[in-house]
Amino acid sequence: MALDSTLSGTAAESYLSVTDADARAIEFGLAGWAAKTTAQKETALRVATQEIDSHRFNSADRYAADQALQFPRGVDDGIVPREIKRALMYQAEWIAMAGDGDRKQWDGANAAPLSSTGNTSPLCPRAMNILAKFISRVGRFS
């Protein structure tokens, strides 16, 4: 099934289409992304979006009450922030390159810490560094 990246869509699965992700991979120097199949890229984008959306966010409610994904938020003027898309690209590339077996390891470090209570995030450190300013430190990610 084709990946749905419709902005504020009720069935959206990703903040980026494969075409957009391919362009960003070149922009960010993620050379390994090009070697993946379209199906692998779609899966990585779906999973990465779910992992980003598993967090609680600081900003207002979703832009549209019936949108499937967490972004855009009410403060985003109907667009997904560039930082969210960049974090998604890093997370998707990590998923595509590392595979499920090594997903808790990135450059020798465990998943990024989410809070002082010891909860951890499924995000790779590069994605977590970008998203840290958006993520609420109250409660647990779901």
Image (tube, helix red, strand yellow):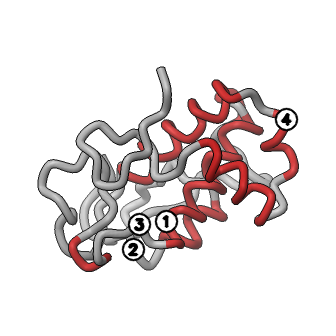
Given the current orientation, which residue lies at the most extreme top position? Answer: 1
Give SS at disc 3. loop
The residue drawn where x is 59% and y is 62% is 127
Give SS at disc 4. helix
Say what amino acid the circle numbered 4 marks: Ala
Mark 2 vs mark 1, CA separation in Å: 9 Å
Pointers 2 and 3 in contact (CB under 8 A)? no
Say what amino acid the circle numbered 1 marks: Ile
CA neighbours of label 3 inside 10 A, class few (<14), some (14 to 19), many (20+):
some
Mark 1 or 3: in front is 3
N-terminal-most mark, 2 or 4: 4
Mark 1 vs mark 3, CA separation in Å: 7 Å
Mark 2 or 4: in front is 4
N-terminal-most mark, 1 or 4: 4
Pointers 4 and 3 in contact (CB under 8 A)? no
Name the residue carrying label 2.
134
Mark 1 vs mark 4, CA separation in Å: 24 Å
Between residue 138 and residue 72, name the one nearer to us. Answer: 72
Name the residue carrying label 4.
35
CA neighbours of label 2 inside 10 A, class few (<14), some (14 to 19), many (20+):
some
The residue drawn where x is 21% and y is 63% is 62
Pointers 2 and 1 in contact (CB under 8 A)? yes
Pointers 1 and 3 in contact (CB under 8 A)? yes
> Picture coordinates of residue 24 (x, y %)?
70, 59
Name the residue carrying label 1.
84
Say what amino acid the circle numbered 3 marks: Val
> Picture coordinates of residue 61 (x, y %)?
17, 67
> Picture coordinates of residue 96 (x, y %)?
70, 37
Say what amino acid the circle numbered 2 marks: Phe
Name the residue carrying label 3.
80
